[in-house]
Image (cartoon, rainbow, N blue to C red):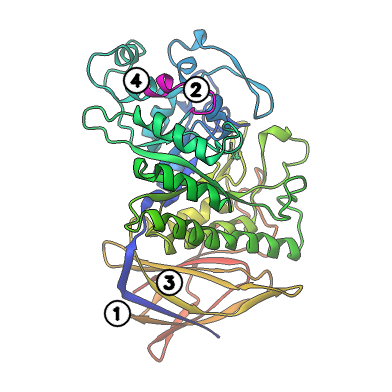
Amino acid sequence: MAKLIVNADIPKGTIDRNIYGHFSEHLGRCIYEGIWVGERSPIPNIDGMRSDVVEALRKLRVPVLRWPGGCFADEYHWKDGVGPAEQRKRMINTHWGGVVEDNRFGTHEFMRFCELIGAEPYVCGNVGSGTVAEMSEWVEYMTFGGESPMADWRRRNGREKPWKLAYFGVGNENWGCGGNMRPEYYADLYRRYACYVRNYGDNRIFKIACGANSKDYDWTEVVMRQAGRFMDGLSLHYYTIPTGRWNEKGSATEFDEKLWFATLKHTLFMDELIRRHDAIMTAYDPEKRVALIVDEWGTWYDVEPGTNPGFLYQQNTMRDALVAGINLNIFHNHCDRVRMANIAQLVNVLQAVILTEGARMVLTPTYHVMDMYNVHQGAALVAAELDGPVYEMDGERIDQLSVSASVDSSGRLHVSLCNLHHADSADIVCDIRGLAVSEAAGTILTADAMQAHNTFDEPEAVKPASFDGFRMEGGRLVGRLPARSVVVLEVR
Ligand code: AHR
């Protein structure tokens, strides 16, 4: 029997709602088809953005959206994407499929999309192949309210008022696709570029430096030491790859219990990564002023058979639901340092919450987990100690359960629990302290098979159901978590 002690009266910090952020890149069918279909499309749209996707994302309460990349960001020249659509420059998207990018979706369209879904924009600038002036002018274009060359150009392009822009990234993966830089070199460039990312009027920009690739702790060490005091956030990218090998990552839908286990084990590594990067950051920033921004996370599989390898289109199963639940629990439990995270990517790419095909749209298991977990947005993390069973496979051992708990502004306690085991349920007794408790009820996401997923023909194969599997016994909550399940309970 697993034992969980929740101290509902011991707050441990706020779960920033930006932990529920998303990422959208000019990659495959994310922007084009997934978001943008154009005003004249037969697919219902609002100003060219597909209405079904807008509605689903509004419902999901997406707090922040990162754009335009990714690797694309360090090849993107924003001036090509503003002004009359038919005059916009066409370019080759060299990173992603070698397709023509006609710049139809640019700054104005992105800002409009953010307004429609109710998200804060997080724009990533070009350090790899762009100039300081170009980055500085982009910020002026977006946020300056007075008279200036860029603000006047924005007005001529149809937008009178400046936009509010809270988050700006100074480059993406500059250790790799963003310029193959050494951390010493990037740290100096960061200081220079960030200097010209100005605060105009009352707009205040939270500046995010490019952070490490997974366990490149040296990158964090050097960048924090040389440039830590000039940044508000430092990013971290980590993807879950079932096999751990980039050349053969594994299928999204065809896998056995060994790959299920390996995928979840790789996901749990996020906890160690955050701890170790945090420890390095703490040496330079003991007050935890600089946030760790996990602005790319999620599963990365081999693409769906028959699709463009450069488009990174993959299905999404119950396994992805567990990956999402585990990662979100980890982010919650590190909310003192992790203050934003952006799942990769929003629609049709990697661990997407939405898939589209023509006029059809499907919500993935990952969508449902994020929707269920939304009760934690902005809530106070509370202490939750778990003494649970071990999940073993071929001599390797991981925790079978993952948990986090929070109390929202109305005093409601929510506990999210994942049972990682592919076949075994888990009995659990919860001792809830600091709150008078009489019942617990909530929502569960589970399915008969590990590989269960939603398709355009069967869009509701995996969907949340109400869950009342817990009862009061001797002043404690006792219940059973089914195998391969994600549960969010409200404890009253
Ligand atoms: O999300 C896909 C790619 O993964 C991004 O463009 C890049 O930043 C990362 O390597």
Magenta residues? 126-136
Q: Which residue is mark 2?
A: 130
Q: Earlier in the sequence, mark 4 or mark 3?
A: 4
Q: Quadrant of residue 423?
A: bottom right
Asked if the residue under mark 2 is in contact with the one under mark 1, i.e. CB atoms within 8 Å, the reply is no
Which one is in front in this view, the residue at disc 1 or the one at disc 2?
2
Amino acid on which disc 2 is placed:
Gly
Q: Quick check: 149 left or right of 87?
A: left
133 within the magenta span: yes
Tell me, yes or no, whether the two marked residues, 4 and 2, touch with CB atoms within 8 Å.
no
Q: Is residue 366 left or right of residue 257?
A: left
| x 48%, y 50%: residue | 221
Instruction: Classify 10 Å Cα crowding around label 3: few (below 14), some (14-19), many (20 and above).
Output: some
What residue type is disc 1 on? Gly
Is residue 62 visible in the rendered image? The answer is no
> What residue does disc 4 label?
141
Determine the residue located farthest toward the top in the rendered image. 87
Where residue 153 appears, as percent x and y from the top left, is 34, 12
Mark before the other along the chain sequence, 1 or 2: 2
Residue 138, position as x, y percentages in the image? 39, 22
Mark closer to the chain start, 4 or 2 = 2
Residue type marked 4: Tyr
Amino acid bearing label 3: Ala
Between the residue at mark 3 and the residue at mark 1, the CA separation in whole angstroms equals 19 Å
- The quarter holding residue 29 reads top right
User: Residue 125: percent from the left, percent from the top?
Assistant: 46, 29
What kind of element bears circle 3?
strand
Q: CA distance from mark 4 to mark 2?
A: 16 Å
Q: Quadrant of ligand 1?
A: top right
Marks 4, 2: nearer the viewer: 2
Residue 98: x, y in percent? 68, 24
Q: Which residue is mark 1?
A: 434
